[in-house]
């Protein structure tokens, strides 16, 4: 009996996850990737002995990775070494106020109590509720395909939903527990990257605080691309064929079935097609209009997670006052959030993030050097120019040097910037977004773009613009969910 042929467009975490799951189930799977390396946004850039993760740099929710590899009788340790960071990260609040978030629970409780009397006891209760949300949300709800509200109709799930605080805002929810402005900033920071202001994000997402403070911040030695290499190795062991440097140009539909995938080099016949590339790009550029799930007006009304400007910087100096992960929260959090979500514009006084993996891993920079990645969240759709990128680098470099008391301006060996135009060019990213579709209440679960094309019976979607949402662990899960749907149907 001939195996059914699956073509996966795009080799990000979701595409690799879907491909490997289907290969394990006996499908003949080919991934077609436009870029020269697999991994989607989790690409790697090397220069003069430096290695930079160009995309994701936070390894959170280690249990999701463990569960993924367990499906194939493997574990992460078979492929890469994990190290838990302690402190998890450093926050520069300004005015010589620096806070290191402890990795251990007792130290974390003491940390909260130092800022606000009674906060340790409140944190215990807050994290217990967040743990429940995490266990129901990440271990159950996110593995549902979001086809219908009936998926959430069994008694256990309905009971759980009442405790999930879906209708409460994250902002009001945390203020029920804490009043100290520094603690509030710490708790709100993970939500900023989910794609909405805390007051418009469901309190359900306190599960991110559980992931942060209880499950911890980890680092795979060699960088996040080590996870990509592990997934590629596993996929190829299962028989997945990965084709690089080849771009899909159209999906030809016959009798409401996606039959032929046309690239810039070849034509491929398919029994099943999975769009692991940008959902909007697949719909608007690869499919003829009658076969699209959504009209352009639908996409214009979506709330996108942020885009960002990134700077990859190699310096010939070791730094004493910088950890692996560093948050610069010395400016107005609410102002920057409004400039991303309410009145999209280039920020006046942006918050920013700095990764320095060489603090943990001596393989990513030459001896005596550091690899720095600066990131400024910005509104999606803002056109960048070289002048704009230089302006913002100067802004954050000045603040970095002032707050960290580290002078690096004369130690910069090279600098590469990456912004809106690069996300569009490399990933066909809708509005140049970096993180996908925002996790607002009306864009959660059944309200996200569907995994399955309603008009083309054998065309499916996976990744950050469909269920369950943005981030590396949700992308892994998205691939599993879509492969389960395909197995049910074929």
Image (cartoon, helix red, strand yellow):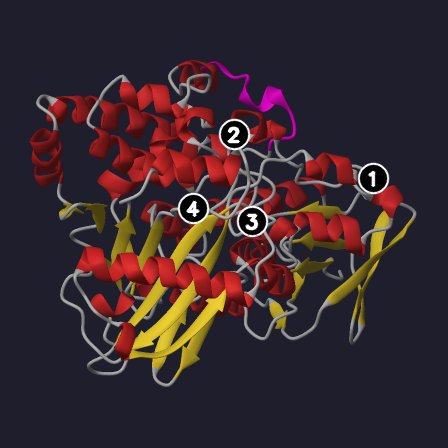
Mark 1 vs 2, N-terminal side: 2
Provide the residue designation for mark 1: 455
How many residues crowd around disc 3 within 10 Å: few (fewer than 14), some, or many (20 or more)? Answer: many
Q: Tell me where the magenta segment starts and ends, as one range.
A: 146-155
How many residues crowd around disc 4 within 10 Å: few (fewer than 14), some, or many (20 or more)? Answer: few
Q: Quadrant of residue 111?
A: top left
Q: Left or right: where does residue 332 sit relative to residue 448?
A: left
Q: Left or right: where does residue 176 sit relative to residue 380?
A: left
Q: Quadrant of the N terminus?
A: bottom right
- Closest to the observer, 145 or 423: 423
Q: Position of residue 202 (x, y in %)?
A: 44, 25
Provide the residue designation for mark 4: 348
- Closest to the observer, 373 or 208: 373
Mark 3 vs 4, N-terminal side: 4
Q: Left or right: where does residue 320 sit relative to residue 248?
A: left
Q: Position of residue 144 (x, y in %)?
A: 55, 33
Provide the residue designation for mark 2: 440
Q: Position of residue 386 (x, y in %)?
A: 54, 67
Under circle 1, the secondary element is loop
The span from disc 1 to disc 2 (Cα, nearest Å) is 27 Å
Provide the residue designation for mark 3: 479
Q: Where is residue 95 in the image (x, y as percent from the top left)?
A: 16, 45
Mark 4 vs 2, N-terminal side: 4
Q: Do the residues labelled 1 and 2 touch (CB within 8 Å)?
A: no
In the picture as drawn, the residue positioned furthest to the right comes out as 255
The span from disc 4 to disc 2 (Cα, nearest Å) is 25 Å
Name the front one of labels 3 and 2.
2
Q: Residue 270: in sight, yes or no?
A: yes
**Quick check: is 97 in the magenta stretch?**
no
């Amino acid at each position: 009996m001939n195996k059914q042929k699956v073509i996966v467009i795009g080799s990000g975490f979701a595409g690799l996850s879907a491909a490997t799951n289907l290969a394990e189930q006996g499908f003949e799977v080919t991934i077609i990737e436009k870029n020269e390396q697999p991994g989607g946004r989790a690409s790697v850039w090397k220069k003069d002995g430096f290695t930079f993760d160009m995309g994701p740099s936070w390894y959170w929710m280690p249990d999701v990775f463990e569960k993924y590899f367990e499906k194939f009788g493997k574990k992460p340790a078979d492929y890469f070494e994990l190290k838990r960071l302690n402190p998890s990260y450093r926050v520069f609040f300004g005015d010589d106020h620096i806070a290191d978030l402890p990795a251990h629970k007792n130290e974390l409780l003491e940390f909260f109590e130092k800022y606000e009397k009674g906060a340790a006891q409140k944190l215990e209760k807050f994290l217990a509720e967040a743990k429940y949300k995490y266990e129901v949300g990440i271990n159950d709800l996110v593995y549902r395909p979001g086809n219908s509200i009936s998926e959430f109709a069994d008694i256990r799930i309905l009971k759980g939903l009442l405790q999930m605080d879906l209708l409460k805002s994250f902002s009001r929810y945390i203020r029920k527990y804490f009043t100290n402005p520094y603690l509030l900033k710490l708790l709100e920071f993970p939500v900023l990257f989910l794609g909405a202001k805390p007051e418009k994000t469901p309190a359900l997402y306190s599960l991110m605080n559980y992931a942060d403070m209880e499950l911890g911040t980890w680092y795979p030695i060699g960088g996040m691309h080590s996870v990509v290499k592990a997934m590629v190795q596993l996929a190829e062991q299962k028989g997945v064929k990965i084709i690089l440097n080849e771009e899909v140009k159209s999906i030809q539909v016959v009798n409401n079935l996606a039959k032929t995938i046309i690239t810039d080099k070849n034509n491929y016949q398919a029994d099943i097609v999975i769009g692991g590339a940008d959902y909007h790009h697949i719909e608007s550029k690869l499919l003829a209009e009658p076969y699209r799930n959504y009209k352009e007006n639908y996409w214009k009304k979506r709330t996108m997670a942020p885009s960002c400007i990134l700077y990859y910087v190699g310096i010939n100096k070791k730094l004493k006052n910088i950890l692996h992960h560093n948050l610069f929260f010395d400016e107005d959090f609410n102002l920057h959030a409004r400039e991303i979500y309410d009145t999209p514009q280039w920020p006046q006084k942006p918050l920013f993030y700095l990764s320095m993996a060489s603090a943990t891993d001596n393989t990513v920079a030459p001896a005596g050097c550091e690899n720095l990645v600066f990131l400024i969240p910005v509104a999606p759709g803002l056109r960048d120019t070289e002048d704009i990128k230089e302006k913002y680098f100067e802004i954050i470099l000045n603040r970095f040097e002032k707050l960290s008391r580290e002078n690096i301006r004369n130690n910069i060996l090279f600098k590469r910037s990456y912004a809106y135009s690069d996300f569009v060019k490399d990933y066909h990213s809708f509005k140049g977004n970096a993180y996908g579709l925002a996790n607002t209440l009306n864009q959660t679960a059944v309200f996200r773009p569907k995994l399955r094309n309603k008009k083309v019976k054998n065309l499916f979607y996976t990744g950050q613009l469909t269920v369950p949402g943005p981030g590396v662990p949700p992308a892994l899960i998205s691939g599993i969910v879509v492969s389960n749907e395909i197995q049910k149907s074929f």
